[in-house]
Image: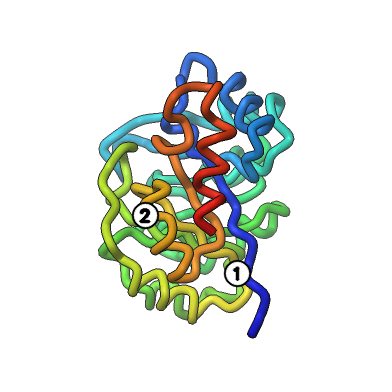
């Protein structure tokens, strides 16, 4: 039997205090987080507006953790260069956010950044066909994107199908992740958990315990 893949925790800064994102990033790094998940929303592709590349650059100065930047924007292509230059380690795009997913992933990797594809609840796994050679990470959304704090959608069959398809690429799951829902996600094959509310609950004094609780279910 192959060794279990380590489960990594990526707190979603969407649930942090936006007036103190640098402090939140440093506190999560000290608390044992493995990466920071940064949700970029444009008010068009999703019904919310969050941050731009200037904030990503500030986060890069605040923390040495990998920055997993989730582009919930359309079109995504014109912004790949600026987010890569801002310090993103991973840029994740949606198949629906541009006409040529293959070209978008090529553009990301050409800038020395890992490339991810996010699958919304209604996006079929077949969207990954013909681009797997360019994909470092697949992000399965277990909520509809745009807002934090939503209830988990039980898409474990979809997570299993992605795991079977992507080989050694990273499988991340985002949406309604808590110590209660994480075991189902991990059993289905996830090796990254993106958690917002569950990671930031209780304030900085609770971050380490929150991460231990999420990691402990693995």
Most extreme residue toward the top, as rendered?
19
Judge whether residue 56 can be spotted in this image. Answer: yes
Residue 14: % across, % down: 43, 33
12 or 55: which is nearer to us? 12
Residue 81: % across, % down: 62, 44
Residue 88: % across, % down: 64, 42
Residue wearing tag 1: 169
What's the residue at 66%, 38% (across, down)? Answer: 32
CA gap between label 2 and label 1 equals 22 Å
Report whether 146 appears left or right of 129: left
136 or 101: which is nearer to us? 136
What's the residue at 36%, 54% (across, down)? Answer: 181
Query: Which scheme is used to colour this image of the protein?
Result: rainbow
Dot 2 or dot 1, earlier in sequence: 1
Picture layout, residue 79 above or below residue 152: above
Report whether 145 appears left or right of 104: left
Quadrant of image for the C terminus: bottom right
What's the residue at 45%, 20% (across, down)? Answer: 17
- Which of the 4 quarters of the picture holds residue 97? bottom left
Q: Is there CB contact under 8 Å for labels 2 and 1?
A: no
Q: Nearer the viewer, mark 2 or mark 1?
A: 2
123 or 54: which is nearer to us? 123
What's the residue at 50%, 58% (across, down)? Answer: 172
Report whether 115 appears left or right of 15: right
Judge whether residue 85 can be spotted in this image. Answer: no
Residue wearing tag 2: 181
Quadrant of image for the N terminus: bottom right
């Amino acid at each position: 039997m192959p060794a279990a893949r380590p489960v990594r925790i990526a707190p979603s800064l969407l649930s942090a205090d936006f007036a103190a994102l640098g402090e939140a990033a440093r506190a999560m790094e000290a608390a044992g987080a493995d990466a920071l998940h940064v949700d970029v929303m444009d008010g068009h592709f999703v019904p919310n507006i969050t941050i731009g590349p200037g904030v990503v650059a500030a986060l890069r100065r605040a923390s040495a953790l990998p920055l997993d930047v989730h582009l919930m924007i359309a079109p995504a292509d014109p912004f790949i260069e600026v987010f890569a230059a801002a310090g993103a380690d991973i840029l994740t795009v949606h198949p629906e956010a541009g006409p040529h997913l293959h070209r978008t992933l090529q553009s990301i990797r050409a800038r020395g950044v890992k490339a991810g594809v996010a699958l919304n609840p209604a996006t079929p796994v077949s969207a990954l066909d013909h681009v797997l050679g360019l994909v470092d990470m697949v992000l399965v959304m277990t909520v509809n994107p745009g807002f934090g704090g939503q209830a988990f959608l039980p898409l474990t069959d979809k997570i299993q199908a992605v795991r079977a398809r992507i080989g050694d690429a990273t499988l991340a799951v985002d949406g309604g992740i808590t110590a209660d829902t994480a075991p189902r996600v991990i059993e289905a094959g996830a090796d990254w958990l993106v958690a917002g509310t569950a990671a930031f609950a209780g304030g900085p004094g609770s971050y380490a315990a929150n991460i231990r609780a999420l990691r402990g279910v693995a």
